Amino acid sequence: MKIVDSVEDAVRQIAEFEGSVFDFRLALSERLLDPIGVNMAIITDHILKRGWLPDGFSQGDGFRTYHYKSQA
């Protein structure tokens, strides 16, 4: 799994993913976790457009791997 270090790369991974939401994992560099939350707001907006909801994360060394579930 590639650790994403830009909002653009995260949005691209979200848009291009084909398969079950339960198989999608988004590993984000902690550098994207800005204090105000703008980057995560943009990423979450794209997640919601796919019909997905955040479902927690796993902490790694310098990154977090986010998990998602279906809204249905």
Image: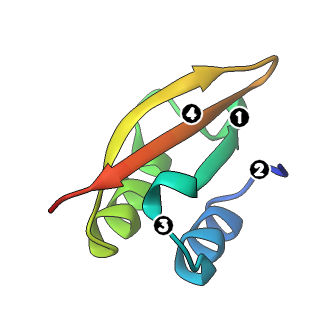
Q: Can you say which quadrant of the picture contains the C terminus?
A: bottom left
Residue of label 4: 33
Q: Mark 4 touching mark 3, by CB under 8 A? A: no
Q: Earlier in the sequence, mark 4 or mark 2?
A: 2
Q: Nearer the viewer, residue 17 or 22?
A: 22
Disc 4 to disc 3, C-alpha distance: 26 Å
Q: Earlier in the sequence, mark 1 or mark 2?
A: 2
Q: Mark 4 touching mark 2, by CB under 8 A? A: no
Quadrant of residue 13 in the image? bottom right
Residue of label 1: 31
Residue of label 3: 20
Under mark 4, the amino acid is Leu
Q: Position of residue 29 (x, y in %)?
A: 73, 37
* Residue 35 appears left or right of 2: left
Q: Mark 1 touching mark 2, by CB under 8 A? A: yes
Q: Dot 4: what SS?
A: loop
Under mark 2, the amino acid is Asp
Name the mark nearer the viewer: 4 or 3. Answer: 3
Disc 4 to disc 1, C-alpha distance: 5 Å
* Residue 14 appears left or right of 45: right
Disc 1 to disc 2, C-alpha distance: 7 Å
Under mark 3, the amino acid is Ser
